[in-house]
Image: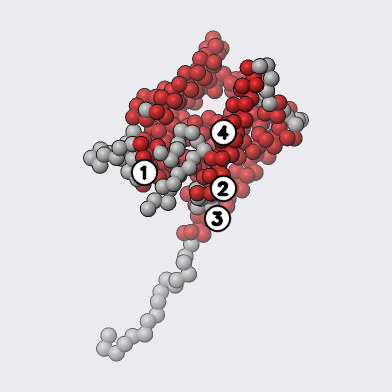
Amino acid sequence: MNDTGNILWIPIIVISVLSILKLLNKNKSNGKPWIRIEKVEENE
Amino acid sequence: MSKHLALRSGNPALSASTFKKQSYASSEASMTIQGTVHKTGISLILCILSAGYVWGNPSLHFLAMPAGIVGFILAMVTVFKPTIGYVTVPAYAVVQGAFLGVISMIFNEMYPGIVVQAVFLTFGTLGALLLAYMSGLIKATENFKLGVAAATGGIAIMYLINMVMGFFGSGLSIIQSSSTMGILLSGFIVIIAALNLVLDFDFIEEGAEMGAPKYMEWYGAFGLLVTLIWLYLEILRLLAKLQNRR
């Protein structure tokens, strides 16, 4: 087996990892809180 | 307006006018990404089965040259008559598979193990670029398409010159050379072939978005198959050069 060819896997792995990180960041929370505390008006 | 409208693909099978040439009958079923994925899968399976069968039957190795010629004719028919892609694309996959089977066997005899590595690298590249396209890491912008198309055209011209010179018993030695320049050139060609996959994904997405006719699924699969075969052959050549350097 040609071991020197293994170097060609480096860009494939780098692109895959960067893509997965980007996908994970996309699906991450957008910073808005899960709950929101609002001021309750009278008679509400 | 679709972000893909001004499509420029380096793949000669996939040009800007391809979808415009087709009449969009609203009544008939339209192209979908899933349908194209299925047809690409069928084409790939046919190609791999054909390659494996020819590899295992040395009596069929004389088919390499005729398969190459018939493959070229089928490709031309598919480009100019995409409506019959359901016949020409599977046939193209089988014929190209036979051609690849012989080529792969020759390479594997010279450099044992190289074919397995080239196959994994080809599908690894496909997977990585599909992820990059889906995540938006690599976007098929107009400048990107223009750059890849220009580079692909340049490579095509280089191969054409090499072929013409071959008729006179000569050729561009750098294409086969295992020198540093030869390896860098091969690496560059592999990168451009890989980036053509992004243009193919974009072409298929555009076709589905624009509601292209159902038969264009076969055409999208054909484009992807052409690029994958090219990528595989270039990876095979690059691996052979790297092994020569050892």
Looking at the picture, the colour scheme in use is secondary structure
Q: Label 4 vs label 3: CA separation?
A: 26 Å
Query: Mark 3 belongs to which subunit?
Result: A
Q: Which mark is residue B208?
A: 1
Coordinates of residue B20 in the picture (x, y in percent): 36, 40
Q: Residue type at mark 2?
A: Ser
Q: Which residue is mark 3?
A: A21
Q: Earlier in the sequence, mark 2 or mark 3?
A: 2
Between disc 1 and disc 3, the foreground one is 1
Same chain, labels 1 and 2: no
Q: Which mark is residue A5?
A: none
Secondary structure type for disc 1: helix
Are dots 2 and 3 in contact, CB under 8 Å? Answer: no
Q: Which residue is mark 2?
A: A16
Residue drawn at x 35%, y 45% as measured from the top left: B210
Secondary structure type for disc 4: helix
Are dots 4 and 3 in contact, CB under 8 Å? Answer: no
Q: Residue type at mark 3?
A: Leu
Most foreground residue, B67 or B107: B67
User: On screen, B90 above or below A28?
Assistant: above
Q: Label 2 vs label 3: CA separation?
A: 9 Å
